[in-house]
Structures are given as C-alpha cells and as structure tokens.
Amino acid sequence: MNNYPFQQQGSPSSNEIEVRTLYQQLLDNWNRRNADAFASSFAEDGQVIGFDGSQMAGQAEIASTLRQIFTDHLTGAYVSKVRDVRLLSPDVAILRAVVGMVPHAQSEIEPALNAHQTLIATKHDDQWRITLFQNTPAQFHGRPELVQQLTDELRQLIK
C-alpha cells in the first residue's frame, strides 16, 4: 500500500530532475561539511528552518551558522529518499523527502534523528535555487512502529 499519495507516476520532467539534483547537492554538501557550498544552493534571501527549530535567513547567515556548527560538532551524514517533487508553476517546485542520519564514526542510522525535509525551489534565469528548506523531526510520538518502519526503509539505502 502506498502511504505517500503525492508520489507522481511516469517519467520525471527535466525540472523535476533538476530540483532533485539541487536537493542531493545540498545533502552532499552537508555530508562534506562544506558550509559555503551548502549555502550557495539557496537564493540570496533563502531560508532554513533547522531540525531544532532554529532559523537562518540569507546565504551569508546560512553559511556562517553552518561553519560554526561544523566547527563545534562532528555532524552525521544524511541518507535520504525523495517522496515527491511537484511543480507548482514552471518556476516553483516543492520537494518532500525523508532522511535518516548516520552519526560521525558510526555505520547505522540513529532513529532519533530521522526527519521529514521540505524544500521549496524557485527558478530564476534558468537556474533553480532553494527558497525554503525545512527539516522536521520524524519522531512519531507514541508510535514507535512508525519510527522503526522509517528507519528500516532508510537503512536499505545505505550501501
């Protein structure tokens, strides 16, 4: 049974592929701990709502905040699965994904760090940029079977 009714059927458009690529580059830059490259995926006035609810506005603040995070913490690496990409107009797209995180120096996903991620991208001058990126904990309070189900699904992506 498909629990994710927003998945589209058929071949993705070039815009959908570009938005997926933008998202994957964002996560790759996080995993490489490259704050400047991470921030460069955003529009100048792009915004982030982090896992802990913190907010960052603009490329400069995003880069500065992430530089500090990467300096102070040995961050884990994301494992992701895109659930849906929708073009809301020719120049606006929304991507929904689920992620797990493998903590630094470990090889297994930490279920407490599973999240839903939402990205809104806009296209200017033929280039997609992130306008909003939100990372929401997927803790499923009182429903541990859902935590386990998501963790098991994401574990299958680890090579």
Image (cartoon, rainbow, N blue to C red):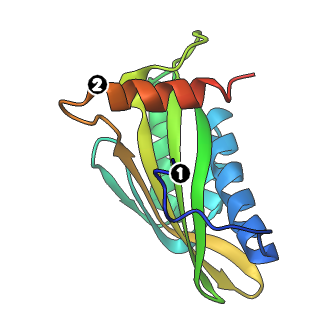
Residue 112 or residue 154, whichever sits in front? 154
Residue 6 or residue 129, whichever sits in front? 6
| Spot occupied by residue 76 in the image (x, y as percentages of width and height) | 54, 25
Q: How many labels does the image show?
A: 2
In the rendered view, does 148 fall on the left or right side of 60? left
The earlier-in-sequence mark between 1 and 2 is: 1
In the rendered view, does 147 fall on the left or right side of 150? left
Mark 1 or 2, which is nearer the eye?
A: 2
Say which residue appears at 68% left-offset and 34% top-offset.
32
Say which residue appears at 45% left-offset and 19% top-offset.
110
Q: Which residue is under mark 1?
A: 97
Q: How crowded is mark 2: few (under 14 residues within 10 Å), some or many (20 or more)?
A: few
Q: Quadrant of residue 10?
A: bottom right
Distance (Cα) linking label 1 and label 2:
20 Å
Q: Which residue is under mark 2?
A: 144
Q: Quadrant of residue 39?
A: bottom right
Q: Which residue lies furthest to the left in this view?
A: 142
Quadrant in the picture for the C terminus? top right
Say which residue appears at 28% left-offset and 25% top-offset.
144
Q: Residues within 10 Å of mark 1 (few under 14, many from 20)?
A: some
Say which residue appears at 64% left-offset and 56% top-offset.
23
Residue type at tag 2:
Pro
Residue type at tag 1:
Ala
Residue 143 visible, this orientation: yes
| Spot occupied by residue 75 in the image (x, y as percentages of width and height) | 51, 26
| Spot occupied by residue 41 in the image (x, y as percentages of width and height) | 64, 62
Q: Residue furthest front?
A: 1
| Spot occupied by residue 103 in the image (x, y as percentages of width and height) | 51, 18
